[in-house]
Amino acid sequence: MMDLRPRSHPTYLAFLVHRISGLLLALFLPLHFWALGSALRGEEALEGFLRWTDQPLVKAAEFGLVVLLAAHLAGGLRVLALEFLGWRRRQKDLVALSAGLSLAVGLLFLLDVL
Amino acid sequence: MPTPERGATLEVSIWRGGAEGAMRTYQVPARENQTVLDIVTYIQRELDPSLAYRFACRVGMCGSCAMTVNGRARWTCRTHASRVVGPDGKLELRPLANLPVIRDLATDMAPFFDKWAKAGGRFQPKDAKDGAVPEEFAVVPPTSKQRQEADAGIECIGCGVCYASCDVVAWNPDYLGPAALNRAWTLVNDVRDGARAERMEAVAGDAGCHSCHSTQSCTERCPKQLDPSASIAGLKRRLFWDTLLGRRG
Amino acid sequence: MSAARGQVHLWIVQRVTAMLLAVAVTVHLVTILLAVRGGLSAAELLGRLQGNAAWLCFYAVFALAAGLHGAIGLRNIAGESLGWRGRGFDLAWLGIGLLTALFGIRAAWGLYAA
């Protein structure tokens, strides 16, 4: 059994979020491209697909994806800041900032679609 | 934990055995002032002389008494019982993770130190090959950037707490680990050293710095407040530019 | 070429695509937030993308970066959790990444030429 007790510091949680969001996004990517590919079959096919996405459940999934994407982006910027700029002292602040940014993007999306 | 009452006891469960084994529980008198190492010593002297564990200095200098205390790697000599014993009076001690267990609380540190050697952890004087003593003292200005990078990681005493706390070590047994990579980074920044190119090759790839995911458990746990995670990031940065600019030969 | 060298190259691709994606995903998120106002329609989408070479280039680079970035990320996860390591797996992941990217570029072309 995995021992969770020593894994609760902010940068570890940031890693978990980054890994899980990355995994889900990577699996979603081919689906996304396949759906957009419907445009190859003309405007009507694309319109048909877009109307399918109007369902509440699909919109909820889209909200999830937007939050995952924002979280992966913000968390990735933290990693790049550490690796390429050597920003080591404010790592915990960057984690908090990433979380805030992804929530803000998610909220904006919700406000837009509701 | 509040000040223990007279006659109060702690319930200490300890790993007994090697790779195979089981937890065994001991009742230890609770004292106002005791470290986790004091508790282990009490058990061995008063309750069960067959208990194996390792320590030397008892004051946080030697780095030999690290164990897994309530799931987290710590120096037992510098961990006051009151900081880790819960309100239920329970304490759980296991050997360091990610290392072979010799017996009970003593691990075999050989794989840990072998990786230091693999990471090029030995200083190779530029102007005196084969470890000869250079004729002159090297002058390294304390304010120079490289000196400061090296100074930031130099205080490591090799206790293995970061290595035991690192998930990447658990996932990839070849991974050199935070301590060895931190050591390599201090030497890469040592202007007196002449083995930089070989060392950079030794720490490159999946067994080296490129597997680190910056979870920073090493930095979080280091009892010396070092930042191996930043050292590893430094190695990655250096290798990124060396590779792109064709400086790796 | 040594095994370690190939691994370093994969890491470099991962980080260079990350830097590209940092910009592209930001643009993507802003576009999403603007586009979903008042609902998505095929006419609106095609009005923006059809015959627009700048968007085509953007999405082509975006798809290439995302395909490679995702595949290398999956490679790391598979190596660490499933023990899928070695040159054969690396080449397979690289192939999957390029294939995903091609699929995305095909979709972008579809929207451009629709």
Image: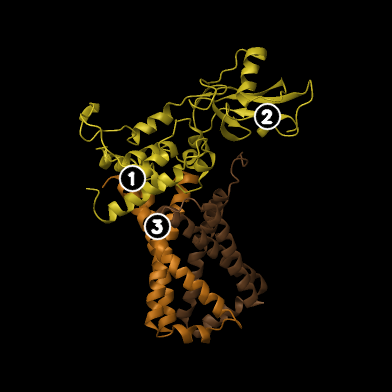
Q: Which chain is brown?
A: A
Mark 3 falls within which chain? Answer: C
**Residue that label 1 marks:** B146
Dot 1 amino acid type: Gln
Residue B159 shows in this picture: yes
Percent x, y of residue A113: 63, 77
* Colour seen for chain C: orange
Q: Which chain is yellow?
A: B
Label 2 crowding class (10 Å Cα cut-off): few <14, some 14-19, many 20+? many
Secondary structure of the residue carrying tag 2 is strand
Label 1 crowding class (10 Å Cα cut-off): few <14, some 14-19, many 20+? some
Percent x, y of residue C28: 49, 72
- How far apart marks 3 and 1 lie (CA) works out to 28 Å
Dot 3 amino acid type: Gln
Residue A20 position by quadrant: bottom right
**Residue that label 3 marks:** C14
Residue B167 shows in this picture: no
Dot 2 amino acid type: Leu
Residue drawn 62% across the image and 26% down it = B36
Establish if B23 lies above or below B180.
Answer: above
Q: Is residue B27 left or right of residue C56?
A: right
**Residue that label 2 marks:** B91
Q: Nearer the viewer, mark 1 or mark 2?
A: 1
